[in-house]
Image: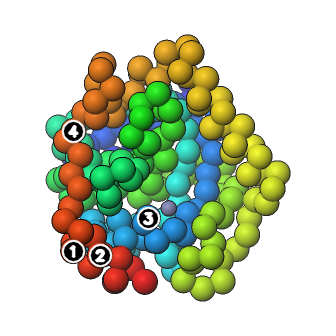
Amino acid sequence: MAVHPFQCRCGTLRGEVDEPRRAMRAVCYCRDCRAYAHWLGQPDYVLDPLGGTDIVATHARHVRLTAGASSLACMSLSPRGLLRWYASCCRTPIANTPRQWKLPYVGLVHTCLAQSRPLEPDFVPVQMDINTKSALGSAPHRGGPGMMARFGAMVLRLSAARLTGSYRKTPFFVADGEPVAAVHVPPKAEVDAARQVAQ
Ligand SMILES: [Zn+2]
Ligand SMILES: [Zn+2]
């Protein structure tokens, strides 16, 4: 079975993604993803010239940590926002997940995936550009309605995990559905400062 390794920039936190060819890939130009990259202090390693973040979307059960799990930290830009997982050792972004573990969507951030070898050909090339209106310039529009529909179908398939219980296999939540690390929501002024520089 094919796997693609990932690791933080200092190499403490390591893991693998199973079945990389089944993952989907999008660049997100939203202001939240951009503010997050700045909050981490890693814009140069995360953002493309248009302020986009390259994301690999898959089922949480395909993601496994192999070393340094105690470095896995979690933050959210707001009390109800997406959970954003990163390596606390060197502040490398790892993945974003919903707060609800029963929707086992994982959006892996390219930075950790590109440390050992390039994303391609293990993963497909970027299929879609999302939130292009907030790009820092004229973003490409890869994908279109057909790809949006495929992405929607993937999320629907992930929702079925509710019935099969497959959401229980995840490195991000423990058996009662609590995140494996405390969710840190920075003070609003800190988030606002990151948003300011991310403009
Ligand atoms: Zn590290
Ligand atoms: Zn985003």
Query: Is 110 drawn above or below residue 142 in the view shown?
Result: above
The residues bearing labels 4 and 1 have C-alpha atoms spaced at a distance of 23 Å
Callout 4: SS = loop
Residue drawn at the location 30% of the way across and 19% of the way down: 175
Some atom of ligand 2 lies within 8 Å of the CB belonging to the residue at label 3: yes
Work out which quarter of the rendered image holds the C terminus and state it: bottom left
Q: Distance between the residues labelled 4 and 2?
A: 24 Å
- Nearer to us of marks 4 and 2 is 2
Mark 4 or mark 2: name the one nearer the start of the chain. 4
Image coordinates of residue 12 in percent, x first then y, are: 21, 45
For label 2, the residue is 192
- Asked if marks 3 and 4 touch (Cβ < 8 Å), the reply is no
Identify the residue under disc 3: 33
Q: Are marks 2 and 1 in contact (CB under 8 Å)?
A: yes
Which residue corresponds to mark 4?
181
- Indicate the amino acid at tag 1: Ala
Asked which secondary structure carries label 3, the reply is: helix
In the rendered image, which residue does mark 1 sit on? 189
Q: Is residue 49 above or below residue 95?
A: below
Task: Pinpoint residue 81: horizontal percent, then vertical percent.
Answer: 38, 53
- Crowdedness near tag 4: few (<14), some (14–19) or many (≥20) residues, C-alpha within 10 Å: some
